[in-house]
C-alpha cells in the first residue's frame, strides 16, 4: 500500500513538473525568451514575474522569474498568485454576458432594469455601453476603500451625472466605473456577492481552483507581494491596496496556471478537458469587434481589445494595480489550421507588463506576415488656421488638456493625470494626429507621444484622445 502511494505521488509529481516546465517546440526558444524577460525585468526594475504559454490547448511553457518578495528573497513559481488589475474585466464581462444568454437581462436595455437605487442618469446606461467603454463615464481607479461585500452597491449608488463627461454612446473611452456597474449587475441578478458569483459561474467550472477576488483567501496560497519602485529599488507596498467597490474592474488574484485554463477554453470555443464549460456564443460575444477604438485600426469587444495584426487575430487586455501588472494575449492566425496561442504574463511591480517579452514570445510562435513598409508622415508646424481651430480646453472631468497659442506655437498643458509635465509644444503629424515635440519639467515620457483628434459631423474637433481615454472639448 505504501509503495502504491509512493508511485502515485511520483506520477503526480511528474505530471506537475511537465506542466510547469518546457515542452519544446521547433520554433520556440525558451532560453532566449527567458533572457529577454530577465533583461526587461532589470530594465523596468520589476522584482518578479510568472509567464505561461499555451499552444493548441496544451501547456508549452510556464516559468517563474525573479523574486516574489525582495525582503525574503522568495522566488516566483508558476503556481503563485498575483493580483491582475484590469485583465479582470474579461471575466466580469463573461459573467454578465453569460447571464444575458440565460435571459436574465438584455445587453441593450438600461442597467437600471436590474440595479435599483441608481441615479436616473446612471440607470439609463446599457450593459453594452458599460462593457465597451462607450457609456460616457469618466475614468477613475480608486485603489483603497471598504473591504465588505456591500461596498460595491453602496458606492455605485453615489454616482450621479458628474460621472459622465460626454453623452452615452458617442465614443469609446476607457473607464473602470463601467465595470463596477457591470459587476454590480451580476451581483444583483444572482442575489449573491460578486466575488462568490464569479467563483460559482467561472472559476470553479474552469478548474481555476486558487483564483479569487478575496484578499483574505488569496493570502492562504503562495502569493507574490506587490512592489513599487521608490528611488532606484523596488520595495513592498504596505499596506496592499484594496477597495471592494472596484473589484469587478481589476481585483482578481490568479496564477498563470489557473489563467491558462481560461485561455485554453477561450480558444476552443468554451471547451476544456473534453467538456463544454463556456458556450460558443459567449466566446463569440466577447470577441466580436463591437466598437472601434479611435486612433488605431482595432476594436473593443466585451472586456477585450480586438485586432488583426499582420495576418494574426489577437484578443488581449493589460492590467495595472498598485504593486502589480499583467498581460493576457490570445492569438490565432487567419488560416483555418493556424495554431492557437495564449500568453500570460504576471508581474509584481506597479504597471509592469513586460511588453517586449510578450512581443518576442508571439513572434517566436506565430507566423506573422512581414511588416509592411509604411511611410511615416513628416511632422510639420501647425498653421495659424490649424492652431485657431484646435485651441481650447478638453476635459474628462478631473483630467484636462488645454491647447493654447503662445508665441506662434500651440502649447499643451494638462492636469489631473498621474504624470504631468508643465507644457509640450505640438506639431502636425497627419491623419488627425498631434505630436509632442518638446516638454518642460518632467520630459517627454510624462505625456503621451501623440494625441488623436476626433471630429464632429461638421469637421470641428470634438474629442482629443490621450492613450485610450477621450477628453471632450468645452464649448
Image (cartoon, rainbow, N blue to C red):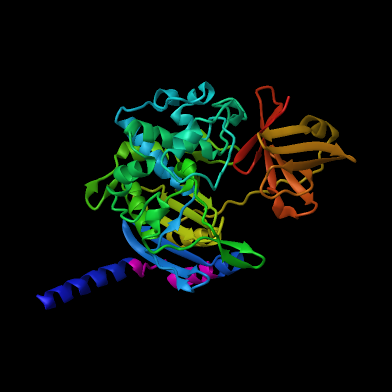
Where is residue 295 shown, x and y percent of the image? 61, 40
Where is residue 118 shown, x and y percent of the image? 48, 26
Residue nearer the viewer, 340 or 42: 42
Q: Is residue 456 left or right of residue 142?
A: right
Asked whether residue 305 is in view, the answer is: no
Residue nearer the viewer, 68 or 432: 68
The quarter in which the C terminus is drawn is top right
The quarter in which the N terminus is drawn is bottom left
Q: Give the answer, above or below, for where 215 lies relative to 278.
A: below
Is residue 31 part of the magenta span, yes or no? yes
Residue at image location 17% in from the left, 76% down from the top = 6
Residue at image location 49% in from the left, 39% down from the top = 300
Asked whether residue 128 is in view, the answer is: yes
The magenta-colored residue range is 20-38
Where is residue 335 shown, x and y percent of the image? 38, 48
Where is residue 121 shown, x and y percent of the image? 54, 23
Residue nearer the viewer, 430 or 439: 439
Q: Give the answer, above or below, for where 419 lies relative to 348.
A: above
The image quadrant that residue 257 belongs to is bottom left
Q: Is residue 413 left or right of residue 23?
A: right
Amino acid at each position: 500500500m505504501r509503495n502504491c502511494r509512493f508511485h502515485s505521488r511520483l506520477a503526480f509529481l511528474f505530471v506537475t513538473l511537465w506542466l510547469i516546465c518546457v515542452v519544446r517546440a521547433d520554433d520556440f526558444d525558451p532560453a532566449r525568451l527567458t533572457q529577454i524577460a530577465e533583461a526587461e525585468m532589470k530594465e523596468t526594475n520589476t522584482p518578479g514575474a510568472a509567464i505561461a504559454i499555451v499552444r493548441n490547448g496544451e501547456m508549452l511553457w510556464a516559468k517563474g522569474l525573479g523574486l516574489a518578495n525582495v525582503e525574503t528573497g522568495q522566488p516566483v513559481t508558476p503556481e503563485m498568485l498575483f493580483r491582475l488589475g484590469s485583465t479582470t474585466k474579461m471575466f466580469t464581462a463573461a459573467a454578465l454576458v453569460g447571464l444575458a444568454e440565460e435571459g436574465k437581462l438584455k445587453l441593450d436595455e438600461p442597467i437600471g432594469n436590474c440595479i435599483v437605487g441608481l441615479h436616473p442618469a446612471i440607470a439609463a446606461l446599457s450593459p453594452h455601453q458599460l462593457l465597451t467603454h462607450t457609456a460616457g463615464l469618466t475614468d477613475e481607479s480608486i485603489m483603497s476603500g471598504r473591504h465588505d461585500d456591500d461596498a460595491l452597491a453602496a458606492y455605485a449608488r453615489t454616482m450621479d451625472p458628474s460621472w459622465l463627461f460626454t453623452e452615452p454612446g458617442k465614443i469609446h473611452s476607457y473607464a473602470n466605473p463601467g465595470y463596477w456597474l457591470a459587476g454590480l449587475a451580476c451581483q444583483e441578478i444572482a442575489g449573491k456577492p460578486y466575488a462568490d458569483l464569479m467563483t460559482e459561474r467561472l472559476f470553479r467550472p474552469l478548474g481555476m481552483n486558487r483564483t479569487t477576488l478575496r484578499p483574505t483567501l488569496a493570502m492562504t496560497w503562495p502569493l507574490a507581494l506587490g512592489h513599487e519602485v521608490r528611488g532606484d529599488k523596488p520595495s513592498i507596498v504596505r499596506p496592499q491596496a484594496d477597495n471592494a467597490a472596484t473589484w469587478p474592474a481589476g481585483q482578481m488574484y490568479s496564477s498563470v496556471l489557473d489563467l491558462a485554463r481560461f485561455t485554453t477554453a477561450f480558444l476552443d470555443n468554451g471547451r476544456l478537458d473534453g467538456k463544454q464549460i463556456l458556450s460558443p456564443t459567449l466566446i463569440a460575444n466577447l470577441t466580436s469587434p463591437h466598437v472601434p477604438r479611435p486612433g488605431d485600426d482595432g476594436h473593443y469587444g466585451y472586456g477585450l481589445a480586438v485586432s488583426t495584426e499582420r495576418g494574426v487575430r489577437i484578443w488581449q487586455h493589460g492590467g495595472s494595480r498598485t504593486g502589480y501588472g499583467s498581460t493576457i494575449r490570445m492569438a490565432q492566425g487567419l488560416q483555418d489550421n493556424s495554431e492557437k496561442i495564449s500568453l500570460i504574463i504576471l508581474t509584481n511591480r506597479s504597471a509592469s507588463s513586460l511588453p517586449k517579452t510578450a512581443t518576442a514570445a508571439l513572434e517566436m510562435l506565430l507566423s506573422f506576415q512581414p511588416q509592411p513598409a509604411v511611410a511615416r508622415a513628416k511632422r510639420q508646424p501647425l498653421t495659424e488656421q490649424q492652431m485657431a481651430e484646435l485651441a481650447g480646453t478638453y476635459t474628462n472631468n478631473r483630467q484636462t488638456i488645454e491647447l493654447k497659442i503662445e508665441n506662434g506655437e500651440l502649447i499643451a498643458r494638462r492636469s489631473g493625470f498621474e504624470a504631468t509635465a508643465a507644457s509640450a509644444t505640438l506639431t502636425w503629424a497627419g491623419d488627425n494626429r498631434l505630436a509632442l515635440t518638446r516638454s518642460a519639467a518632467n520630459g517627454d515620457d510624462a505625456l503621451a507621444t501623440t494625441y488623436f483628434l476626433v471630429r464632429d459631423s461638421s469637421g470641428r474637433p470634438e474629442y482629443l484622445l490621450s492613450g485610450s481615454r477621450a477628453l471632450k472639448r468645452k464649448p
